[in-house]
Amino acid sequence: MTNGLAHESIGNGTRVVVFSHGFTQTRSMWRPIAHELCKRDESLRCVLVDLPGHGESAHIATPIEEAARLLVATGGGAVYVGYSLGARVALRALVDHPAIVQGVISISGTAGLETESERQARVTADETLARRLEAIGVGAFLDEWLAQPLFADLPRDQAGLPDRLGNTVAGLAESLRNCGQGRQRPLWDDLRTSTRPLLAIAGSLDLKYVALARRLASTAPHGTLTLITGAGHGAPQAMPLAVVDAILEWLTSQR
């Protein structure tokens, strides 16, 4: 059994914050934010993780509950920050490993689809995406992926394309099949009884995820909402300093 995920650390502090990325990305998406955080708060140490199927963890194919176990095995006792796919893994880690996860910052995240029909439709859609990826390769797939309306507010030069192009067909396809939203059981009921703090962040232009962030913040007993004004789904890439401000403000409030 694999006991951890590929990762790197930035900063020398004792307060650990673990970062997980979105689909088609790697841990390097977080480097600018991590460096800025550690510059502003020397008590922090940021651990940046490659999720299964991505980056140097491309060879690892696991369902989302195992991805969550591997994430906490890598990061240990810490606050967990996740973006999109990474937010879903971090929320699963919170539910499954509350003694280890000290809190979660969910950016453009969700606690899952609630009905079986919604989940099955998403499984079917993700299988179609995986087959498309296998047919056309990573480069052409990314052209199509980033052309979605979801990323309309993310300029191409801010999308981290060189980073994404380093991923493999096999790794990304397995991520779609194992860790897509259709494979995730809904966590809304679990979050209602969570004793850990949760910050839900969304870009103000990303209306679907604004609604999900509001619901996350109101569902968790210790939930907080922050909207990044003028950002869409790709807030960490498009407006990294605003995301740093939101993270630091929340971390300070949790001391």
Image (cartoon, rainbow, N blue to C red):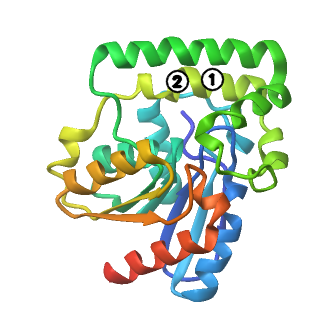
User: Can you say whether 174 is above or below 47 in the image?
Assistant: above
- Location of residue 189 by image quarter: top left
Residue 219 relative to residue 131: left or right = left
| Residue name at image x 65 percent, y 79 percent | 36
Numbered badge on residue 207:
none
| Residue name at image x 34 percent, y 47 percent | 211
User: Can you say whether 167 is above or below 46 in the image?
Assistant: above
User: Can you say whether 11 is above or below 157 in the image?
Assistant: below
* Observer-nearest of 13 and 184: 184
Q: Which amino acid type is marked by label 2?
A: Asn
| Residue named by callout 1 | 174
In the rendering, at what x and y percent does residue 136 appear? Answer: 83, 17
| Residue name at image x 76 percent, y 15 percent | 134
| Residue named by callout 2 | 178
The crowd level at tag 2 (other Cα within 10 Å; few <14, some 14-19, many 20+) is many
Q: Which amino acid type is marked by label 1?
A: Glu
In the rendering, at what x and y percent does residue 46 appear? Answer: 58, 70
For the residues bearing labels 1 and 2, Cβ distance under 8 angstroms: yes
